[in-house]
Amino acid sequence: VMAKTIILIKALEGTFIEGIPFGYGRFINSNGDYYEGDIKYGRANGTGVYENKYVSYRGQFKDNQKHGKGVEKTEQSLF
């Protein structure tokens, strides 16, 4: 069972088309969590990295959710 990740946006860095994030970029939320990778229509879609102080996930995303293949490491497995 794969846990879902909700990305709350504080800042956006990257490419915009008609004011909508599209291409490669980075979402940063208020507590420092971030997603960096492919963005389509303002959402994490494609390959990217999501990290917070407890978990790091590298893999595929669809509509801001982990989707498909990926590797998740928890705080305990990072040390």
Image (spheres, rainbow, N blue to C red):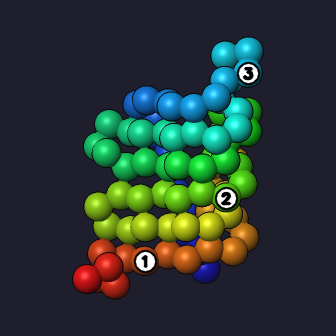
Name which residue lies at 55% across and 67% down.
58
Please state the horizontal and vertical placement of residue 72, each as a whole percent of the image: 49, 75
- For the residue labelled by badge 3, is the local secondary structure a helix, a strand or a loop? strand
Q: Is residue 8 left or right of residue 69?
A: left
- Name which of mark 1 and mark 2 comes first in the sequence: 2
* CA separation in Å, label 2 and label 3: 19 Å
Q: Quadrant of residue 24?
A: top right
Q: Amino acid at mark 1?
A: Lys
Quadrant where the N terminus sits is bottom right
Quadrant where the C terminus sits is bottom left
- Relative to 28, is 1 above or below? below
Label 3 with label 1: CB-CB less than 8 Å: no
Residue at label 1?
Answer: 73
Q: Amino acid at mark 3?
A: Ile
Label 1 with label 2: CB-CB less than 8 Å: no
Q: Which mark is residue 24?
A: none
Please state the horizontal and vertical placement of residue 78, each as a whole percent of the image: 32, 79
Q: Is residue 76 left or right of residue 21?
A: left
Q: Which mark is residue 17?
A: 3
Q: Amino acid at mark 2?
A: Thr
Q: Quadrant of residue 39?
A: top right
- Relative to 61, is 42 above or below? above
Estimate how packed mark 2 is, as few (under 14), some (14 to 19) or many (20 or more) residues with alpha carbons within 10 Å: many
Nearest the eye: 13 or 11 = 13
Label 2 with label 3: CB-CB less than 8 Å: no
Please state the horizontal and vertical placement of residue 67, each as a whole percent of the image: 69, 65
Residue at label 2?
Answer: 47
Name which residue lies at 51% across and 31% down.
13
